[in-house]
Image (tube, helix red, strand yellow):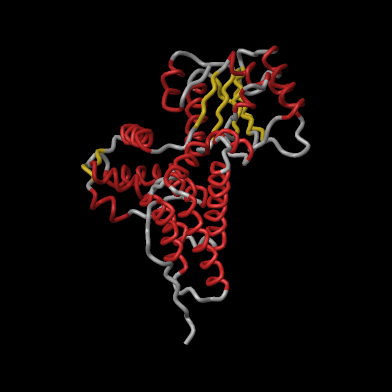
Amino acid sequence: MRCYANQLSSELKKGLKPFYLVFGEEPFQEAQCVQLIRDTAKAQGFDEVIKFTLAQGFDWQEIIAQYQSMSLFSARTIIELDLNQQKPGTPGANTFKKIVELENPDTILIVKGAKASQDVQRGAWFKALDKHGLFVPCYPLSGNHLKRWFDEQCQRLSLNIQNEAKLSLINATEGNLLACYQELEKLALIHGDALITQQLVMQGLLNQAKFDIFDLSDALLNGHTAQAIKVLNKLASDNTEVVSILWAINKDLNTLLSVQQGLLQGESLATLFKQKAIWKNQQAPVQTAINRLNIHTLENISSELALFDASYKQGALIAPYQALAHICIKFCQPLDIPLPCHSNRQ
């Protein structure tokens, strides 16, 4: 059975399941879910926790042995298995299916892993555990989902925080739930239940937003100018290599150019998505970009990227991130201004 992270507390109140599958791309949320399961189980006598991490040479028989054994110290045990961003393979799949057959009421199995793709969820081992347990997917949070999560943490910590202060904190730690929660814990420790204003938040706030070049790609394809510049500024402050950012922009540009050229030749968008290996989760952003950027605009951006590349390699750019910002803006919206390219030679 599927249960989202914010529903887990309510599900646990209904009773414990023998198996929990906690999978996702948000490590802090995943850790919170596992801790909540562990705390609930401990209150019901599951005092011992045995942890395993999947690595080369891992002995799956040890999992079965531990699952069947009676603890010397506790009548009830939790086994936590971290798949370490890997798939269990045939030995692991067979182990999970056997454990379901051996179901032990005095042992709870928690399996942690990366995002459970559709092919993983279709696996016999996953279905077997899911049928008798609970699947908790942990997705990256944004928009209203992030605000709801924020409000839940404030309620948990008994924090009284103004809306402006809330928005500032969410904005500064976007993409990093751990940093956000640590800031909330710090505010609770310092101010207790007193009203927390934006000034109090800003006094001790560090900009801990965590972005990478793939976040920049998402913003560019969707035409979100402000978000693209925000991500680029963070990448610049983190000293992300200019060449890496250039590679990401150029990769998206080449994809869009290829699709636009295919459309001009009469190919269908569905066929082009398949030909260019554009996966389902990227098809909507790519289509948004295709609708916004005609082939003339894409060719113009391509020329500017080539100019940027040549100028950067020749040391002719005083402010490369500023020039990248110019290209990002043009990617998101029409901009008939030439690339800022300044020679540093005397």
Q: Note whether 91 is above or below 315 in the view shown.
A: above
Q: Between residue 285 and residue 24, name the one nearer to us.
A: 285
Q: Is residue 141 left or right of residue 21?
A: left
Q: Is residue 87 left or right of residue 201?
A: right
Where is residue 68? Give x, y as percent: 71, 17
Where is residue 142? Give x, y as percent: 40, 38
Question: In the picture, residue 50 is in which quadrant?
Answer: top right
Where is residue 226? Give x, y as percent: 36, 51
Q: Residue at x 39, y 44 (%)?
A: 180
Q: Note whether 198 is above or below 30 in the view shown.
A: below
Question: In the picture, residue 18 is in which quadrant?
Answer: top right
Q: Residue at x 60, y 30 (%)?
A: 117
Q: Between residue 253 and residue 316, name the one nearer to us.
A: 253
The number of callouts visible is 0
Q: Residue furthest bottom?
A: 346
Q: Residue at x 32, y 34 (%)?
A: 151
Q: Note whether 47 is above or below 83 in the view shown.
A: above
Question: In the picture, residue 334 is in which quadrant?
Answer: bottom left
Q: Is residue 183 left or right of residue 264?
A: left
Residue 157 visible? The answer is: no
Where is residue 66? Give x, y as percent: 70, 23
Q: Between residue 291 and residue 158, name the one nearer to us.
A: 291
Q: Residue furthest front?
A: 265
Q: Residue at x 31, y 45 (%)?
A: 187
Q: Note whether 136 is above or below 199 in the view shown.
A: above
Q: Between residue 17 and residue 134, name the one nearer to us.
A: 134
Residue 324 visible? The answer is: yes
